[in-house]
Image: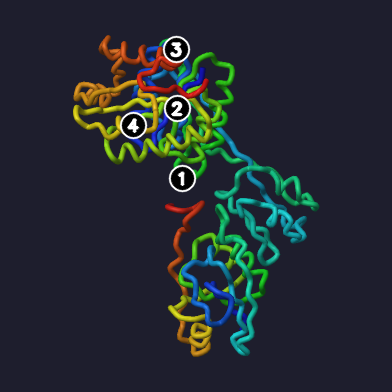
Amino acid sequence: MKIAIPAEGQNLESQVNRSFGRTPYFIIVNSDTMEFDVIENQAMNAQGGAGIKAGQTIVDSGAKVVIAFQCGQNAADVLNAAGIKFLKAVPGTIFEVVEKYNKQELAELTDVHPGYHGRGGK
Amino acid sequence: MRIAVLSGKGGTGKTFVSVNLAYAVKDIVYIDCDVEEPNGGLFLKPLIEREEIIEVMEPSVDNEKCNGCKKCVDFCQYNALAYVNDQLLIFNELCHSCRGCVLLCPEKALAETKRGIGQIEYGKSADVKVRTGILNPGEANGIPIIQKLLRDAAQEKTVVIDCPPGSSCAVMESIKDSDYCILVAEPTLFGVHNLSMVYELVKLFDKPYGVVLNKTVEGETIAEDYCRENNIPILMRIPYDPEIALLNSRGEIAAAHKVEHLGLFEELLGKITGGCSLETTSCTKW
């Protein structure tokens, strides 16, 4: 399975980033082979709509699962439209989180926040 | 002359200064640009002559025509568009109505639609023309209303612009074509912090400016000190006065009640229009 995870660095030893829309990198991992690609997040410094732009990046990457700590409403709208599954990250490296995914130890991400821009505060 | 009245936070007395100045000048246009919570009308009590709905452009997509080239998605600087599962998603609350996506679409799949975001009330209170911008609750961006308010008043001789609080885009839009900026501040530590924000802003915009200190108390000199250190002219000091507070809470205009108050605002106008005869050292260029 192709999984997208927001990451602080550019390899499997990187920590999971706290943010989805404004993470510096996404690591796209094949959970069966642990092969991975790194995508720089063009939305990191966006003035607004970072979640939408990052969501588009993930959709275009072909990932079917996202593992992250949190997600805004706009990003969730984009990922939901693509039928991408959303799981809640746990602290650790990308490698450790994918291992937990393979052992089916990750819960679904349900607490979508209203976003910090655009819809923020509504 | 276009006089903008602004402050780093709400409740310092922007509307108090604006409506009293309008009352003192008489032949003037009062514009309430604080479109999220306009309240100048509570004091001026204008007779509303007409209302105008303000609309913004939003794109709408014909999914039959869209071939998924994503040129619009890549173009949009506000990330208001996404293309997922053979469908264009439009996030209207992020759209800034630039029309770029509509112009760019090679398939002509995007069309312009309109949505009302608020209104402007045009009215009169004695000789004061009163214009009030009102943004609908839940709307994120009142700038199109502010732009229309200021465009309408472009030919007027004397205008006082009651700005939104803070130093955001909406404030920048409100002051950008003004000839003078009055910064209203409270004489507290918090007040000085907020004053410093709008002071930075008017310097960036290269506007002539001066400060009105509101609710001053004997011995509280922190705001005075800040102005002196930065060579900011103090135009006027309004002492803390329960009588003014009472009049204000009743929606009355202080200058209409006491000739002393009226005199203060006439004097304020004189200082703004009369050039550099200000209290502290320098007056910024005209």
Camera-side residue of B122 and B233: B233
> Whole-Å distance between the Cαs marked 4 and 1?
29 Å
Are marks 2 and 3 in one subunit? yes
Residue under label 2? B32
Residue under label 1? B138
Q: Residue B185 carries which label?
A: 4
Q: Do the residues labelled 4 and 2 touch (CB within 8 Å)?
A: no
Q: Residue B274 carries which label?
A: 3
- Indicate which label's residue lies in the foreground, 4 or 3: 3
Are marks 4 and 2 in one subunit? yes
Q: Which amino acid type is marked by label 2? A: Asp
Q: Characterize the local packing of mark 2: few (<14), some (14-19) or many (20 or more) Cα atoms within 10 angstroms.
A: many
Q: Are marks 3 and 1 in contact (CB under 8 Å)?
A: no
- Indicate which label's residue lies in the foreground, 2 or 1: 2
SS label for mark 1: loop
Residue B48 in the image: state x and y as whole percent: 45, 20
Q: Which amino acid type is marked by label 3? A: Gly
Q: Are marks 4 and 1 in contact (CB under 8 Å)?
A: no
Q: Which of marks 2 and 1 is nearer the N terminus?
A: 2
Q: Which of marks 2 and 3 is nearer the N terminus?
A: 2
Q: Earlier in the sequence, mark 4 or mark 1?
A: 1
Q: Which of marks 4 and 3 is nearer the N terminus?
A: 4
- Indicate which label's residue lies in the foreground, 4 or 1: 4
Q: Characterize the local packing of mark 3: few (<14), some (14-19) or many (20 or more) Cα atoms within 10 angstroms.
A: few
- Chain letter of disc 2 in the image: B
